[in-house]
Amino acid sequence: MKKLMKLLVLGLMATTACTAQPILRTHVEGGEVEGILDGNDLAVYKAIPYCEPPLGDLRWKPLQPVKPWEGVLKAEDVAKWPPQPEKSYIKYDMMDEDCLYLSVVTPAKSVDEKLPVMVYIHGGSFSTEHYGGALWESLARRGVITVSIEFRNGALGFLVSDELAKESPTGHSGNYGILDQIYALQWIQRNIKNFGGDPSKVTIFGESSGAMCCNVLCASPLAKGLFCACISQSGAYISKTNMGTYTESMMMEETKSFMERANVKTIAEMRQMDAKALTGNNVFYPSFPVVDGYVIPESMYKLYETGKYNDVPVLIMHNSDEGAAGIASVSVNEYEALLNSQQFPANWLDSVKYHYPGNTDEECLFSIRDLTRDVQFGWPAYTWANLQTKTGKSPVYVAYLAQKSEKTVYAEGNRRGAAHADDCMYLSGRFDEEADKYPEEKKVSDIMQEYWVNFAKSCGNPNGAGLPKWVEYQPNTKSVMEFNNGAQLIDLPNKAKIECIDRFMNFVSQQ
């Protein structure tokens, strides 16, 4: 009888374990929070405030802890978009300066599971887009917790002012959007265990300017210890020339010009302005992280050259047809005029035309796309990888997404591979329900997701059972993982073109 009872109890426990739901209610610093069920295996919290909204007099000031709420906060809908220019899919009534929220997607059924955590930082040129664009449920179903964070964009996130610097306890201004990310990562360190997460296994990942933010976080002393690994998709904030390095003094001049156009004279007046007037359509303000001696102590190139960065494992990728997003056509005359307008020295112009020829309209289209890819994405990616391989101790992995597909996120016209932002389709499971129609894309999607999740689970090693062996990056070896109808190691893609760009960067930096 006792044996029978024991079997019944074990059977009941097994049944309960199989049907147990993920954590749908938990406690964070502000109070109790409740998510919603996605399928029967994920709890999704779409909008948790991680700070007090920086409104009114708090605009352009350090973030404050969130005020506790009463009752249970139901995190059922994503927060509003940060103030930004309108687009076809985003209007002003969908925006609010009260936007600093994050999402959590967890498969954990108890707070004791200690699952690895992947924290996503969205792109958008430091001025646009939204944390709710992807919550990464597909990755979460592979055994990690995914978090997406929002931060201040545009002038709200990156305004630089001598008046703001004087009122700041650090003596600096700007980089508020980066400080928001750091604040959110600190919140994750303190709270993610209540979702079943392991704060010692946090991997940051981002796309485009979000990837550039990841690069900055890897270099900032303020972010030290907040994550164990980093994945960069189409973005690195490294430049060897002044063209890609922004200082506080440079951006202060831009702010003065901005204030003149807005007809305001003080920060107090700017704090009274509607957010739309600061960030809306046809409002010019160059939004970039700045080298301030605080968040970013020196130029990113110098930091990596001298080994002064957070030396964590990195996985760095860019796409084969990055320039296809936004460049649908260009004529021979337009291409020639564009190259001439760049004021290349004669010898460099000849070299550029050799590697990026323009004898026909189609050739010009492909060349301008390739030039965009290599200047904005390829050269920064390989510069980051080469410098960290030389001055760091942690593993560096490099990838190249070259899969061609009918599906795309932003691209127009004829494409020869993966355009800018197309990597997000593969990592979000976009092809799961169309595997029969897109078998190669589905294969690449599964492989990439496995590598990314393995990297997060191990804090730095993408390898796992059933996957092609991925070796650490070394220049001049087959150590770049190409995703194209599967996955295979290749030599540095577009090497001659990248070396051409590198020679030009060296030339300009020495002038």
Image: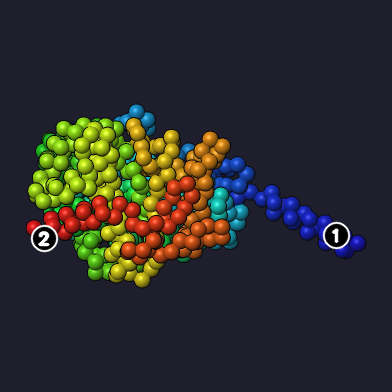
Q: Is residue 506 or residue 212 the one in the foreground?
A: 506
What residue is shown at x 69% (from left), y 54% (from top)?
Answer: 17
> Percent from the top left, x then y, of residue 356?
22, 44
Query: Does residue 476 appear anywhere in the picture?
Result: yes
Eyeballing the image, is 279 above or below 489? above
The alpha-carbon separation of the residues under discs 2 and 1 comes to 82 Å
- Give yes or no for contact between labels 2 and 1 (Cβ–Cβ under 8 Å): no
Q: Position of residue 285 (x, y in %)?
A: 20, 41
Q: Which mark is residue 5?
A: 1
The answer to whether residue 290 is above or below residue 393 is above
Task: Please name the colour scheme applied to the rendered image.
Answer: rainbow
Looking at numbered disc 2 in the image, what kind of residue is underneath it?
A: Gln
Quadrant into which the C terminus falls = bottom left
* Occupied quadrant, residue 395: bottom left
Q: Nearer the viewer, residue 32 or 391?
A: 391
Kindly tell me whether residue 50 is visible in this rendering: no
Q: Earlier in the sequence, mark 2 or mark 1?
A: 1
Asked if residue 413 lies left or right of residue 487, the reply is: left
Outermost residue, right side: 1
10 or 443: nearer the viewer: 443
Residue 510's disc number: 2
Q: Percent x, y for residue 284?
A: 19, 37
The kind of residue tagged 1 is Met
Q: Residue at x 29, y 55 (%)?
A: 495
